[in-house]
Amino acid sequence: EVQVLESGGGLVQPGESLRLSCAASGFTFSSYAMSWVRQAPGKGLEWVSGISGSGGSTYYADSVKGRFTISRDNSKNTLYLQMNSLRAEDTAVYYCAKAGIAARIFDSWGQGTLVTVSS
Amino acid sequence: DIQLTQSPSFLSASVGDRVTITCRASQGISSYLAWYQEKAGKAPKLLIYAASTLQSGVPSRFSGSGSGTEFTLTISSLQPEDFATYYCQQLNSYPLTFGGGTKVEIK
């Protein structure tokens, strides 16, 4: 069974950093692109960042470019999101999502981890 | 960036109704569109990709159509478990974008 499990969320102050992790199991991790998608309280879904199976290609939303870094460790079946210079508008539930038959659709999602940026 | 506009943003319907949700793209995206269902407190679920291909395990009452800039998600006979929020997503180009969502509630 495919499973992805996020961790690392919490309460931080504006300007601080946080690293999210996503542990994957039940599939050949290195064969699939992965993404982070977030949802601010009461709002819709927002794609944040994506990475190819090898880790050689990365993509970012304009809202996080230059502040967030996506990476993966295929030996540990783990996806990461390093978030720097956090802002109040980054407050959201962050979902880890596995690519489906196409690299840009998401066929398995975690339950999410909440990041709150507040002073 | 490609903008996706969903309509309506809110829909009230009864069990057994036929429901249609529209997603319009700000530029042509061929058939590079997916639909997701989100229930409160749960992760989103992929319903349809490539505009009209049903994801494995999704009931056949769900269908998708369209290409270019206009797409629709149709639920042929609404069931109690279908009350949820639905999102379209374009996969034509980065940055990937989602529509604003359509909340389907019980009338």
Image (cartoon, coloured by chain):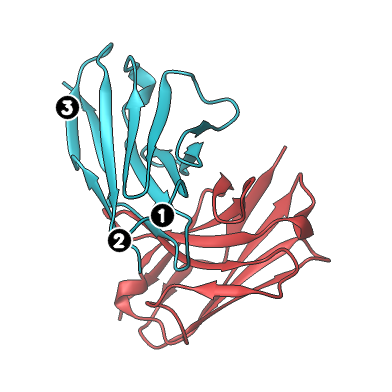
Numbered marks: total: 3
Q: Chain B is drawn in which colour?
A: cyan
Tell me whether circle 2 and circle 1 mark residues in contact (CB < 8 Å): no
Residue B19 relative to residue A107: left or right:
left
Kind of residue sitting beneath label 2? Gln
Cα distance between the residues tagged 2 and 1: 11 Å
Please tell me if label 1 and label 3 are on a single chain.
yes
Q: Mark 1 lies on which chain?
A: B
x, y percent for residue A57: 65, 74
x, y percent for residue A108: 59, 45
Q: In this view, does B24 lie above or below A46?
A: above
Assign a secondary structure to mark 1. Answer: loop
Q: Is residue B18 above or below residue B11?
A: above
Quadrant location of the C terminus of chain A?
bottom left
Task: Please give the residue where the numbered disc 1 appears in the rendered image.
Answer: B29
Q: Mark 3 lies on which chain?
A: B
- Nearer-the-camera pick, B50 or A76: B50
Q: Which of marks 2 and 1 is nearer the N terminus?
A: 2
Task: Please give the residue where the numbered disc 3 appears in the rendered image.
Answer: B12
Q: Of the numbered discs in the image, which one, if any, rests on residue B3?
A: 2
Cα distance between the residues tagged 1 and 3: 29 Å
